[in-house]
Image (cartoon, rainbow, N blue to C red):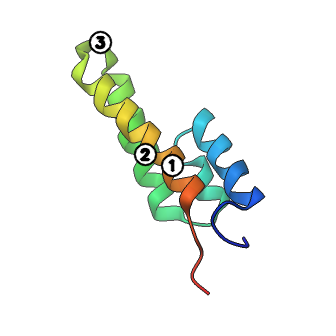
């Protein structure tokens, strides 16, 4: 990756839009990928309770933004 705003980050953000955590996995960040996937997936599973759906949506948006703003350490 060449840094924030690179095409790699755009691709990662699009990946995270469809599957939370996939963008982080594309960037090679395994722990954040697993955490985002698990948290969002669990909250979406309990979507009928409304509050977990809202929390899941917030974490899903966070995963997309995190993938888009990631800047690799030099």
| Crowdedness near tag 1: few (<14), some (14–19) or many (≥20) residues, C-alpha within 10 Å | some
Q: Secondary structure at mark 2?
A: helix
Of circles 3 and 2, which is in front? 2
Q: Residue at x 40, y 37 (%)?
A: 40
| Crowdedness near tag 2: few (<14), some (14–19) or many (≥20) residues, C-alpha within 10 Å | some
Q: Residue at x 59, y 53 (%)?
A: 68
Q: Left or right? Give the position of 68 relative to 48.
A: right
In this view, 6 is above or below 53: below
Residue 8: percent from left, percent from top: 74, 59
Residue 73: percent from left, percent from top: 57, 82
Quadrant of image for the C terminus: bottom right
Of circles 1 and 3, which is in front? 1
Image quarter of residue 6: bottom right
> Marks 2/1: CA distance?
5 Å
Residue 46: percent from left, percent from top: 30, 22
> Marks 3/2: CA distance?
21 Å
Of pointers 1 and 3, the one earlier in the residue sequence: 3
Would you name the residue on which mark 2 appears? Answer: 62
Say if mark 3 contacts mark 2, CB within 8 Å.
no
Check residue 52 in the rendering and tell me which mark sits there, or answer none: none
Q: Secondary structure at mark 1?
A: helix
| Crowdedness near tag 3: few (<14), some (14–19) or many (≥20) residues, C-alpha within 10 Å | few
Q: Secondary structure at mark 3?
A: helix
Of pointers 3 and 2, the one earlier in the residue sequence: 3
Q: Which one is nearer the viewer's eye here, 2 or 24? A: 2
- Residue at far front of view: 5
Say if mark 2 contacts mark 1, CB within 8 Å.
yes
Residue 10: percent from left, percent from top: 70, 50
Say if mark 1 contacts mark 3, CB within 8 Å.
no
Check residue 65 in the rendering and tell me which mark sits there, or answer none: 1
Would you name the residue on which mark 3 appears? Answer: 48
Quadrant of image for the N terminus: bottom right
């Amino acid at each position: 990756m060449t840094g924030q705003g690179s095409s790699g980050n755009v691709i990662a953000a699009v990946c995270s839009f469809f599957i939370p955590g996939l963008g982080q996995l594309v960037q090679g960040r395994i722990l954040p990928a697993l955490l985002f996937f698990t948290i969002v997936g669990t909250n979406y599973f309990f979507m009928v309770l409304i509050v977990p759906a809202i929390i899941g949506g917030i974490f899903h948006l966070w995963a997309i933004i995190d993938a888009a703003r990631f800047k690799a350490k030099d």
